[in-house]
Image (cartoon, grey):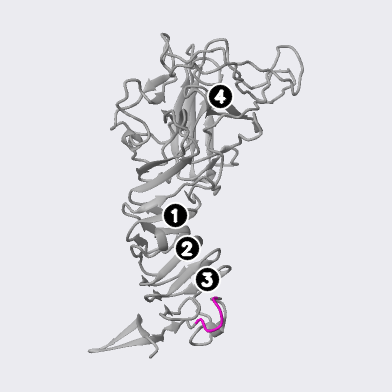
Amino acid sequence: MTPTTLSLSGLTNLGFLAVAEMIAAINWTGNLSNNWYTGGNWSTGAVPVQTSNVVIPTGRPNYPDITTGTATANDLAIQSGANVTVTTGLLRISGAMTNSGTFTASAGSLELNGATAQTIPAAFFTGNEIRNLTINNAAGVTLGGTLLVNGVLKITTGTFASGTFLILGSIATRTALIDGAGGGQVTGTVTMQRYVASRFGYKYLSSPFQSATVNELSNEVNLAATFPELYSYDENKTASGWTAYTTAANPLTPMRGYAANLGATTAPLTIDIKGTVTNSAVSLPLANNNREYTKGFHLVGNPYPSPIDWDAASGWTRTNIDNAIYYFNAGTADRYVGTYSSYINGVSSDGVTNGIVPSMQGFFVHVSDGVYPVSGTLTVTNTVRVNDLAPVFHRRPRRICRCCGYLRGLRMKGTLLIRRYCISTTQPPKDTTNRWRPSNCEIPMCACLTWYSKGRGTGRSPSTHGQTKPR
């Protein structure tokens, strides 16, 4: 017998009598192939449409694999022993979802676009994993159990109530993200991962959440270590800006950066942080107090669960902030050694560094010189967010460093100026001046490739002082 469902839309009361529309379910037969779009694979001889209630029964010779286009259904019921696979296509569901069989979408996409509230049941997906998920339901969608998104999550409209179940996964080739162009919101406590190929040495990190604390990094660094392994950076300190930041309850402030020493092993590591996602404008007041060692530099970070574009045409407010970002790349032989690469006025120091800042990435910016103290503001909105699943997360040194500078009074273009410095072979604040200092390992630090008519470039390279960051 062909199953039927009772739709209550447009229900009319006639005393004790209710009149409703009976909608026959469309059964998958799989008589011809695994192609969803072949009419001969369905009990009605026609491919389901958005109002069709679809049943995938037990014991069919073939089961659907959606490899292209957009397949649609209202309700979707997968019976025991049956399976549906979404490989590179999209399945759009407007109603209820039940699964007693197998639903695989680790490389596919699902959109929920119902007119009433929908739920993703616990264990609905094989391995609790999906590549891309779009929520387009003004009434909202609730997540009923653990789900790892390994691609793009977009909340076009409505609210995605994730509870504590949502994970944005990260592997060597990609890191999941939340599309900043969506008009909806993810609620609940989300876990975001960041894969690093080697945990060796310092990594500059930031939090994509509003409410995360230092305790979120307790699995990655030893917060009780005799010598601290986690630092914030204070531009207004008279010595080094590095400040131990190991109190578990301290906030990981959105758009602030932190330096974490992840250890001496070169094994890969997946960092994870939990919190309420940031999905609004973030602003930081900054300053250049012309301190001897900090010189107006600030360690900031990407505040969103997606990459951001430093070159975005809109979405940034950079008041008295140089058009330059500086990344730290850990060394490979000494866990306290590394180099900086830069992206200044649109020019990469190494051909790899660019204006796409990955999620959870910390980096330095500089408040412009002037009449001190100089006040600056760095503000960012969702407009700068981009859907790049594999930007370069800076964690390893780049061998080639292209630098330039200026000589006063000389016109020049493309001149190469290199000053060689290395981070101290001790931990950052360990020497008596509480700062990093030059050593004999001669690592080049990077500046810009910019030319003005007076021959004065805007790039910076390390001064003769041992700096804690590029200058």
- Number of the front mark, 3 or 1: 3
Of labels 2 and 3, earlier in sequence is 3
435 or 41: which is nearer to us? 41
Q: CA distance from mark 4 to mark 3?
A: 48 Å
Q: Is residue 415 above or below residue 50?
A: above
Helix, strand or loop status at disc 1: strand
Please provide the residue range marked out in magenta. Answer: 30-34
Residue at the spot 35% in from the left edge and 60% down from the top edge: 143
Of labels 2 and 4, earlier in sequence is 2
Of labels 1 and 4, earlier in sequence is 1
Query: In the figure, residue 303 lies in which quadrant?
Result: top left
On residue 105, which mark appears? 2
Q: Residues within 10 Å of mark 4 (few under 14, many from 20)?
A: many
Helix, strand or loop status at disc 4: strand
Q: CA distance from mark 2 to mark 3?
A: 10 Å
Determine which residue is flagged by label 1: 149
Viewport quadrant of the N terminus: bottom left
Determine which residue is flagged by label 3: 65
Q: Residues within 10 Å of mark 2 (few under 14, many from 20)?
A: many
Query: In the figure, residue 233 lies in which quadrant?
Result: top left
Q: CA distance from mark 2 to mark 4?
A: 41 Å
Please say whether residue 182 is visible from this viewpoint. Answer: no
Q: Which amino acid type corresponds to the residue marked 4 in the rendered image?
A: Thr
Residue 144 in percent (x, y) is at 32, 61
Determine which residue is flagged by label 4: 339
Q: Residues within 10 Å of mark 3 (few under 14, many from 20)?
A: many
Helix, strand or loop status at disc 2: strand
Q: CA distance from mark 1 to mark 4?
A: 33 Å
Q: CA distance from mark 3 to mark 1?
A: 20 Å
Helix, strand or loop status at disc 3: strand
**Magenta-colored segment: predominant secondary structure:** loop
Residue 395 in percent (x, y) is at 52, 33
